[in-house]
Image (tube, helix red, strand yellow):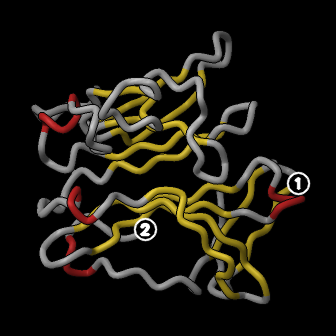
Amino acid sequence: LRTLQAEGFVSYDETTRTYAVSLHILELAYGALRRGGLLDIAIHPDYATNGWVYLAYCEPGPAPTSTTKIVRGRIHDGRWVEQQTIYQSPASLYVADNTHFGARFLFDKAGYLFFTIGDRGTMADAQALGSPNGKIHRVLDDGRVPPDNPFVQVPGALGMIWSLGNRNVQGLAFHPQTGELWSTEHGPRGGDE
């Protein structure tokens, strides 16, 4: 259980070994975007040393378009500072549908960041290697693409793609025995997959 307070902080609970984050200091435009807004928060595995906090949120574009944006930053004196963009679609890939933003984070033991972007209501994008939508992505903690990602050498493909054909991933976890990456998502017919 994480308790967030209004001051804006990151704290660590020794008992549960979890971090708590409060970001009243970050203003996000989401009111008109139905399901947008702040989508996920993650603390860098080496937060105690580097102070990085990762955010996924809906970034509005030219009306009525938007995208899922991934950033990292630090909190100093109650203020969000040193923001760096990890991923943001080019404007040509912004989508007018305001559903299926996805956006779940997970770091692996090697420090790679996995994040998801939903299909944004266009199922065909989930199979298109030139679209970020409907995918699980893997990047280094600063957003650079690892050279061993599966599609990094495929012409026209986004090198950060780790998995494709996803509708709207809402959960990521590593299997405790095998270390395999598992995901959960909303199915197209009212059930979860």
Looking at the image, residue 46 sits to the left or right of residue 133; the answer is right
- The image position of residue 155, as x and y in percent, is 33, 28
Closer mark to the observer between disc 1 and disc 2: 2
Residue that mark 2 sits on: 38
Q: Earlier in the sequence, mark 1 or mark 2?
A: 1
Residue at x 47% of width, y 28% of height: 152
Disc 1/disc 2 C-alpha distance (Å): 26 Å
The disc placed on residue 14 is 1
Numbered circle sitting on residue 80? none
**Element type where label 1 sits in the image:** loop
Above-or-below relation of 50 to 153: below
**Left or right: residue 157 compared with residue 72:** left
Report the amino acid beneath label 1.
Glu
Q: Residue at 64% across / 43% down in the picture?
A: 140
Compared with 175, 186 (above or below) is below
When asked about the image quadrant of residue 30, the answer is bottom left
The quadrant of the rendering that contains the N terminus is: bottom right
Closer to us: 111 or 155: 155
Q: Amino acid at mark 2?
A: Leu
**Front residue of this view, candidates 161 and 6:** 161
Q: Nearer the viewer, residue 92 or 113?
A: 92
Q: Residues within 10 Å of mark 2 (few under 14, many from 20)?
A: some
